[in-house]
Amino acid sequence: MSEHVGTALEQSDIDGFLKDHGLGVLSLADADQAYAIPIAFAYDGEQNRCFFRFIMGEDSRKRDFVATTDRASLAVYEWKTQNQWTSVVVNGPIRPVAESELTVAASLFSDIGEEAALKTFNRPITEYDTAWYNLEPDEITGRGRRVGAE
């Protein structure tokens, strides 16, 4: 079993992986209840943070859970085979994006996350509430395996 565990990624590999991938699973919590959602994100490697554009309906569980989450977790992974895979987990506080940072968030997000987010919904986004959040990591770990990769 240990032959498929992989090795720890260097920070530069983690940064590149997060910049290139715009989809992950964000886990939020309310006391002893967890809530995990697939979500588009953008990674700002210069400032070490992830941006999310929450698109929420009227009765949004996302809205409720993000309000009670002190520390969120984002899992991003790519699986090709048992010998070619990468996974990165980003943990830290999640907060609304400051008004002064909205342009930065939207610009980074439009580079990678926007297309994924737009294809998720079958109604125009204007029919939903939107809110920007960022996760400022206090811990990032990554592992991968590339045996026989080209």
Image: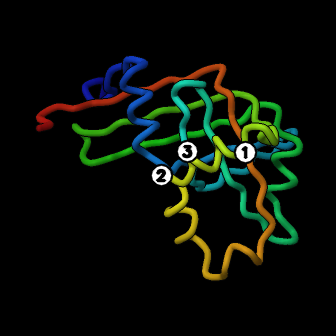
Image-quadrant location for residue 93: top right
Left or right position of 12 against 103: left
Left or right position of 61 against 11: right
Q: Can you identify the residue that label 1 sits on?
A: 102
Looking at the image, residue 58 lies above or below residue 9:
below
The spot of residue 66 in percent (x, y) is 81, 46
Query: Which numbered disc, 2 or 1, marks the residue closer to the eye?
Result: 1
The answer to which of marks 2 and 1 sits earlier in the sequence is 1
Q: Can you identify the residue that label 2 sits on?
A: 112
Residue lying furthest bottom in this view? 123
The spot of residue 87 in percent (x, y) is 42, 35
* Label total for image: 3
Element under label 2?
helix
State the CA–CA distance, disc 2 to disc 1.
16 Å
What's the residue type where badge 1 is placed?
A: Leu
Residue 53's disc is: none
Label 3, residues with CA under 10 Å away: few <14, some 14-19, many ≥20: some
Element under label 3?
helix
What's the residue type where badge 2 is placed?
A: Ile
Label 2, residues with CA under 10 Å away: few <14, some 14-19, many ≥20: some
Please tell me which residue is depicted at 33% across the width and 21% down the height of the picture.
7
Label 1, residues with CA under 10 Å away: few <14, some 14-19, many ≥20: some
Q: Can you identify the residue that label 3 sits on?
A: 108
The answer to which of marks 3 and 1 sits earlier in the sequence is 1
Comparing 34 with 47, the one in front is 47
What's the residue type where badge 3 is placed?
A: Leu
Comparing 14 with 104, the one in front is 104
